[in-house]
Image: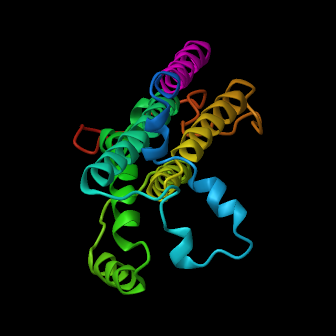
Amino acid sequence: MRSPRLLYWLTAYYLLLSAIFAAAAYIVPEVASFLPIGGMENLLRRPDPGLSSALSPGVPVTGFGATVFWMLMAIIGSILAAVPVSWTYMGARARDGYDQSLVETIVLLPLVVTAIVVVVQNSLALAFSLAGIAAGVRFRHALKSPGDVLFILLAIAIGLACGIGAVELAIVVSLAFNYCFLILWINDYGARPGSPRYLRKDSSEPKVDQPDPQQPGSP
């Protein structure tokens, strides 16, 4: 993985997102009141948030147009926060363990989770119904390493943050994860001689040729 180059791309990406948001807030200040932001601040203000309050949007949204705009921005925010995470996965994963379906899952799973959170908010009946439906679905894809699970959990966290109207939290979590991961990767944190590297097999191990049972003279 070309870590310095990836760091440059990530830095440029997050700076561009910040510049676009700052410009939009400066040009049209009223738009900020309709964006899915501020949910984390509302959660931290509540001394004892319950399930229904924790799943409510960060800002009150009324009207069909405003609701559609809020949901659209939440979905776009989840994708924007997940895309750089997929870059980190693609850069870190070894070629022999690379899975394109997992890359696409990292990008699209936050979108699905965002929609689910919006659907089940303030309704325990819908939440339990969704749990029953999910229990009946069989997922046969086995992840190849614990590192893959980490990326899936992060994608779910991004979707949850956007679903409660805290896109700012999703962006911050995405930024913190990518930079922490790359810093640990560049410094080869926790490595020992002869041990396989994180998300990669140890390429230094000599390969032992196995005899072909179809060849003459093989046992």
Q: Nearer the viewer, residue 146 or 11?
A: 11
Instruction: Give above or below for 37 relative to 2.
Output: below
Q: Which x, y percent locates residue 4?
A: 62, 14
Q: Which residues are magenta?
A: 2-23
Please tell me which residue is depicted at 32% across the width and 84% down the height of the picture.
129
Please tell me which residue is depicted at 32% across the width and 75% down the height of the picture.
134
Residue 208 in sight in this render:
no
> Is 4 covered by the magenta stretch?
yes
Q: How many marks?
A: 0
Q: Which x, y percent locates residue 143?
A: 42, 55
Residue 46 in sight in this render:
yes
The image quadrant where one finds the N terminus is top right
Please tell me which residue is depicted at 31% across the width and 67% down the height of the picture.
139
Instruction: Give above or below for 174 relative to 17.
Output: below
How is the model colour-coded? rainbow
Please tell me which residue is depicted at 46% across the width and 25% down the height of the picture.
24
> Is 203 covered by the magenta stretch?
no
Q: Which x, y percent locates residue 107?
A: 37, 42
Q: Nearer the viewer, residue 194 or 20?
A: 20
Q: Nearer the viewer, residue 46 or 184?
A: 46
The secondary structure that dominates the magenta segment is helix
